[in-house]
Image (tube, grey):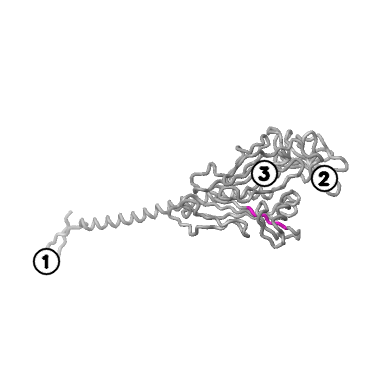
């Protein structure tokens, strides 16, 4: 379209619009802006994905840590403190094999016997993947079945019924019965009949002198018959079935629950607690002089100690090698877990090649260079400090 305008010198032709050069400049600026916005958008999406992955990992970690924390607090729950004369007939804990990589741990070495009451917690030091620890907890409630979470008491008139299906035993459930104090030194003794376990409701009732038995659940009537008067769970880093996002030379912190149906170590009762774990260290806080405060720290087997109480490793080992010593001396359990959050991030650079896992010289300075591309992962030491609630 041609427009005309009048000027003093006459009619002048005026062409409106943009020149080709102007259009090229404008398009270049537009493309540059789009490219900048696109890069920012890609970065936002990328960072959002990474943060989502980190948040998911953190939530999974919190759930796994809560399971472990609850189990540590439950150590010793429902355990008998005394066995009847002659021991426990049919006692058969777990069989011999090697698990957890590293030097390997034989779970059978953590067994107790038919004549000596079970230890609530014990472990092996630096024997698994990357020199990580191995931990065993024994308690009736440590199993994952519903019956194991229940307890009640038996009086002359019969069992106490709570009136809640989640708390009450069901007919046929397998239970153990713990008797009251007898004499000066026998407390929480295991009651036995034709077996060391009873079917709910039990046909026995306390005498006028004993007044009451306490019943603890082991497993349901549809499960295999109990082979020991407690449940057991082993905790270690497994190097099998590790998620692909995990760095090489890391594993999965697992809870392995003992099966009553077989003496073999469980293969189907493996609960993953936390992925991408490089190290798992356990430290016991002990009160060796019974003054009410923790003054000695030791590895879970007592082989190495840090103390202000004048104790020696042999003193510690002798005290934590039996159930009574553990109940009297062990006041705190400290757990340190080295893991990375999320997957590999090539834009991330972890600043150190080592990281401290543990305290008091009883853990280790972990060498991250043993893990390929370690600097591209976000490493973190997760800590749990737990006071056992079922030793008294």
Q: What is the C-alpha distance between the residues marked 3 and 2?
A: 31 Å
Q: Is the magenta stretch mostly helix, strand or loop?
A: strand
Return the x and y of residue 238 as percentages of the image width and height. 57, 44
Q: Earlier in the sequence, mark 2 or mark 1?
A: 1
In front of the other: 144 or 39: 144
The reply to whether residue 200 is visible in this rendering is no
Q: Which of marks 3 and 2 is nearer the N terminus?
A: 3
**Label drawn at residue 9:** 1
Return the x and y of residue 386 as percentages of the image width and height. 66, 54
The reply to whether residue 231 is visible in this rendering is yes
Tell me what residue is drawn at x 36 percent, y 55 percent: 37
Q: Residues within 10 Å of mark 2 (few under 14, many from 20)?
A: some
Tell me the mark number nearer the camera, choosing from 2 and 1. Answer: 2
In front of the other: 79 or 212: 79
Q: Say which element carries label 3.
A: helix
Residue 24 in the image: above or below residue 235: below
Return the x and y of residue 208 as percentages of the image width and height. 88, 41
Q: Residues within 10 Å of mark 3 (few under 14, many from 20)?
A: few
Residue 55 is inside the magenta segment: no
**Label drawn at residue 256:** none
Q: What is the C-alpha distance between the residues marked 3 and 1?
A: 113 Å
Mark 3 — residue?
109
Tell me the mark number nearer the camera, choosing from 3 and 1. Answer: 3
Q: Do the residues labelled 3 and 2 touch (CB within 8 Å)?
A: no
- How many numbered discs? 3
Mark 2 — residue?
180
Tell me what residue is drawn at x 69 percent, y 33 percent: 224
Q: How crowded is mark 1: few (under 14 residues within 10 Å), some or many (20 or more)?
A: few
Residues in magenta, as a range: 282-287
Tell me the mark number nearer the camera, choosing from 3 and 2. Answer: 3
């Amino acid at each position: 379209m041609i427009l005309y305008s009048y000027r003093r010198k006459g009619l002048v032709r005026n062409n409106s619009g943009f020149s080709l050069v102007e259009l090229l400049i404008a398009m270049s600026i537009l493309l540059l802006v789009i490219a900048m916005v696109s890069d920012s958008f890609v970065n936002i999406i990328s960072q959002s994905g990474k943060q989502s992955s980190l948040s998911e990992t953190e939530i999974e970690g919190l759930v796994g840590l809560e399971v472990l924390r609850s189990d540590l607090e439950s150590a010793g729950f429902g355990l008998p403190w005394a066995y009847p004369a002659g021991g426990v007939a049919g006692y058969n804990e777990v069989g011999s094999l090697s698990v957890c990589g590293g030097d390997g741990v034989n779970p059978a070495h953590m067994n107790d016997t038919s004549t000596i009451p079970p230890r609530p917690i014990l472990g092996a030091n630096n024997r698994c993947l990357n020199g990580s620890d191995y931990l065993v907890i024994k308690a009736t409630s440590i199993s994952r079945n519903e019956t194991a979470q229940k307890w009640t008491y038996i009086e002359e008139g019969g069992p106490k019924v709570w009136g809640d299906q989640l708390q009450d035993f069901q007919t046929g459930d397998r239970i153990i019965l713990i008797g009251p104090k007898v004499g000066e030194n026998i407390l929480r003794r295991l009651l036995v009949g034709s077996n060391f376990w009873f079917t709910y409701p039990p046909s026995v009732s306390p005498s006028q002198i004993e007044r009451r038995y306490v019943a603890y659940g082991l497993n349901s009537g549809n499960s295999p018959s109990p082979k020991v008067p407690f449940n057991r769970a082993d905790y270690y880093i497994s190097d099998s079935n590790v998620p692909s996002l995990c760095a090489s030379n890391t594993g999965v912190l697992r809870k392995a629950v003992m099966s009553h149906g077989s003496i073999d170590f469980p293969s189907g009762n493996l609960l993953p607690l936390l992925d991408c774990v490089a190290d798992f260290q356990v430290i016991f806080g002990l009160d060796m002089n019974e003054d009410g405060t923790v003054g000695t720290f030791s590895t879970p087997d007592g082989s190495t100690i840090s103390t202000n109480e004048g104790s020696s490793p042999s003193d510690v080992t002798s005290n934590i090698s039996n159930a009574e010593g553990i109940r009297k001396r062990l006041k705190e359990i400290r757990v340190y877990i080295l893991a990375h959050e999320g997957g590999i991030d090539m834009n991330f650079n972890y600043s150190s090649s080592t990281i401290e896992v543990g305290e008091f010289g009883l853990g280790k300075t972990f060498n991250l260079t043993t893990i390929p591309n370690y600097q591209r992962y976000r490493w973190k030491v997760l800590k749990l400090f737990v006071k056992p609630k079922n030793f008294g």
